[in-house]
Amino acid sequence: MEDLTLKYNNILTPEELFTFMEDNIKYGIHGTNNEDYIPHDEKTNGIFQNACLNYYRLADPKYLLKHKLGHCWDQVELERDWFTKHKYNFKTIFIWFLFDYENSYSTHTTLIYQDKQTNDYCLFEHADFENKGIHHFKTYQDAIKWEYDKHIEYNKKQGNPINEEILKHIHIYEYEHPKYGSTFMDFIDNIFNAKEITNIIEGED
């Protein structure tokens, strides 16, 4: 198996990081049972969510580079590692619909960094199939609003009802470095301790 560590360590720009991930990292998980799970793959699609609940552990960059499979949560941790090492200002964002009952609405994580030349706020998106790329915005609020809109759009496409009452349940957080090896529920527990920024959508402080 090819060792991606050297290639990763030689990446110099966010654009190179995106290309590297596009060429080498797929969406999925390598489970604790040593099985690979990929959504939209006919062999594993039906059991992907179950695998996330039972066989998932948050991957550190070394693990992700080895297995080349990562949930959006894992991919953001690789991005966090790179942007930290290259001394960028950035935030990691978690967005979801929070209900007090089980539901099919998705969660998503992404990273927003500040460009060193233009000072633009850049949303680095690799895990979201339909919105991949580095998206530039003049303000942090604009970047968050874009992600908010895309999250609603994705859930609509998944057949989840969206109405005024449902929209009250969207929550957005800035979260810090979670513990590698966290289970699915460990990760969610970490989010409850994070800084909520949902009100940025309305332009509030």
Image (cartoon, grey):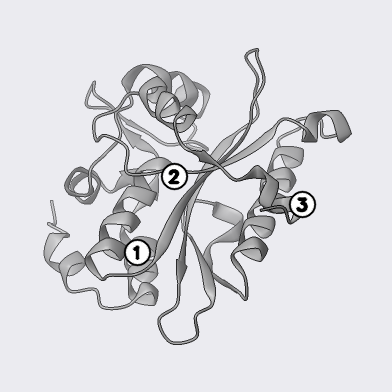
**At 30% from the left edge and 34% from the top edge, which residue is drawn?**
58
Q: Are marks 2 and 3 in contact (CB under 8 Å)?
A: no
How packed mark 3 is, by other alpha carbons closer than 10 Å (few <14, some 14-19, many 20 or more), is few
Amino acid type assigned to the residue bearing label 1 in the image: Asp
Distance Cα–Cα, label 1 vs label 3: 37 Å
Residue 101 in the image, given as x and y percentages of width and height: 65, 12
Tell us which disc is closer to us: 2 or 3: 3
- Which secondary structure, mark 3? helix
Residue 163 in the image, given as x and y percentages of width and height: 87, 34
Distance Cα–Cα, label 1 vs label 2: 16 Å
How packed mark 1 is, by other alpha carbons closer than 10 Å (few <14, some 14-19, many 20 or more), is few
Distance Cα–Cα, label 2 vs label 3: 26 Å
- Which secondary structure, mark 1? helix
- Which secondary structure, mark 2? helix
On the rendered structure, is 148 left or right of 41?
right
Amino acid type assigned to the residue bearing label 2 in the image: Cys
Residue 199 in the image, given as x and y percentages of width and height: 69, 46
**At 61% from the left edge and 35% from the top edge, which residue is drawn?**
96
**At 42% from the left edge and 36% from the top edge, which residue is drawn?**
38
Farthest residue, direction top: 101
Residue 71 visible: no
On the rendered structure, is 151 left or right of 1?
right
Amino acid type assigned to the residue bearing label 3 in the image: Glu
Q: Earlier in the sequence, mark 1 or mark 3?
A: 1
Q: Earlier in the sequence, mark 1 or mark 2?
A: 1
Which residue is more in the foreground, 74 or 90? 90
Which disc, if any, is residue 202?
3
Name the residue tied to disc 2. 72
Instruction: Tell me the quarter of the picture where residue 33 sits.
Output: top left
Residue 99 position (above or below residue 204):
above
Name the residue tied to disc 1. 23
On the rendered structure, is 140 left or right of 69?
right
